[in-house]
Amino acid sequence: MNVKKYVAELVGTFVLVFGGVGSAVLAGSHIGFEGVAFAFGLSLLAMVYTIGPISGCHINPAVTCGVLLARKIGMKDALAYVVAQVIGAIIAAALILFIASGAPGGYDPSVAGLGANGYGAHSPGQYSMAAAFLAEVILTMFLVFTVLGATDIKAPVGFAGVAIGLVLTLIHLVGIPVTNTSVNPARSIGSAVFVGGWALQQLWLFIVAPLIGAVVAALIYGMIRVPAEVITTPQAERALVSEEAERGRSKPA
């Protein structure tokens, strides 16, 4: 069992949640929705190039689901990835809460929300449950579809992180007013655990809808891709063999 890739998923999810949710909770009033969207996108882009060669940088149970359906990962690894992702998200949310609580007047997550996802009265734009559900399905489909395409053996080598990071930014620009944007069950669980109450009651949507979106993405991609050798996401996100060899020959100054 390769424990390193599970640790990589935990750390990667921690970075994504701390960078994304942390920007919303700690700096949201200064950077706005656009800043938060870029924080999520940049966090994911950085992690693709940092842990992508180790684990494939799923850092999202929905992505793991899509990759599993595309037969790029086995069930055992998929389940371990999801556990690691949820743990990483909870740790990140706990530390964000600790830091936020150090502000004058403290921080009450049940009131301030800790970046939790919600619909109805808990949607930034007061969007209905049906609207939130559909948005999460479609936006998750965008993300998983991009991951599958950008890591295909025929995709340009070395550019997966750019495509995946940019699509997550786009997704947040669209989705933040609707649900605060989840497209990632682990990210939603991390905040909901500490907010409790309404966040836990509405959490089902941010688990079910992203998983449905992942299934839709895998089905569509399976229909349109040209049959070829299937490679894993870690393989796809590595540099060219020639580039790896060049790095290996490089010596510190």
Image (cartoon, helix red, strand yellow):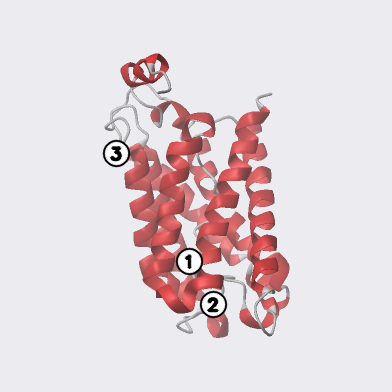
Foreground: disc 1 or disc 2: 1
Disc 1 versus disc 2: distance between alpha carbons?
10 Å
Which residue is tagged 3?
Answer: 224
| Label 1 CA crowd tier, 10 Å (few <14, some 14–19, many 20+) | many
Which of the 4 image quadrants contains residue 240? top left
Which sits earlier in the primary sequence, circle 1 or circle 2? 2
Image coords of residue 127 (percent x, y): 47, 81
User: Of helix, strand and loop, which one carries label 1?
Assistant: loop
Q: Is residue 205 left or right of residue 168?
A: right
State the mark number for residue 119: 2
| Residue at 34%, 61% in the rendered image | 170
Q: Earlier in the sequence, mark 2 or mark 3?
A: 2
Left or right, 63 with respect to 228, comes to right
Label 2 is placed on what type of residue?
Tyr
Q: Are marks 1 and 3 in contact (CB under 8 Å)?
A: no
Q: Quadrant of residue 119?
A: bottom right
Quadrant occupied by the C terminus: top left
Q: Which residue is mark 1?
A: 181
The first of marks 1 and 3 along the sequence is 1
Residue at image position (66%, 39%) is 79
Local secondary structure at mark 2: loop
Three-letter amino acid code of the residue under disc 3: Ile
